[in-house]
Image (cartoon, rainbow, N blue to C red):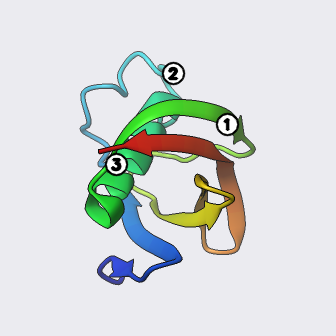
Amino acid sequence: MDQPKPDNQRYRAALHVPPEHPCLPGHFPGNPLVPGVVMLQHVAKALRDWRQKRLVRVLEAKFLAPLYPGEHAEVELGEAAGRIRFEIRRESHVLARGLIEGEA
């Protein structure tokens, strides 16, 4: 996956959760999925890297498809009327999307 690509209006960053991540054994035994909160941690990190802001509020979040351990995905952030929209994609599939706010 490419390195993060910053610009003024959009930001992209790689997302990868290895199969040995400590959140996975209980989520779900026999068929592990990356928890939504871990995906949101990657959104928060991308916001810090892009705008040097911390995530203070998740206004909207929809999880549309699972992310499995070991899969590669991408976080994309973009401006939306003073707020930040995010999408998490695996290839052309949207896994999650939403609206967040951050502050310095």
The residue pinned by badge 3 equals: 17
Amino acid found under the numbered disc labelled 2: Phe
* Marked residue nearer the N-terminal end (3 or 1): 3
Q: Position of residue 13 (x, y in %)?
A: 39, 68
The residue pinned by badge 2 equals: 28
On the rendered image, what quadrant is the C terminus found in?
A: top left
| In the image, residue 52 above or below residue 69 | below
* Marked residue nearer the N-terminal end (2 or 3): 3
The local secondary structure at tag 1 comes to: strand
The answer for how far apart the CA atoms under marks 2 and 3 are is: 15 Å
The residue pinned by badge 1 equals: 61
Q: Position of residue 9 (x, y in %)?
A: 53, 77
Circle 3 crowding by C-alpha within 10 Å: few under 14, some 14–19, many from 20: many
Q: Quadrant of residue 44?
A: top left
| In the image, residue 25 above or below residue 1 | above
User: Is residue 97 shown left or right of residue 24?
Assistant: right
Q: Are marks 2 and 3 in contact (CB under 8 Å)?
A: no
Amino acid found under the numbered disc labelled 3: Val
| In the image, residue 93 above or below residue 37 | below
Q: Quadrant of residue 99?
A: top right
On the rendered image, what quadrant is the N terminus found in?
A: bottom left
* Marked residue nearer the N-terminal end (2 or 1): 2
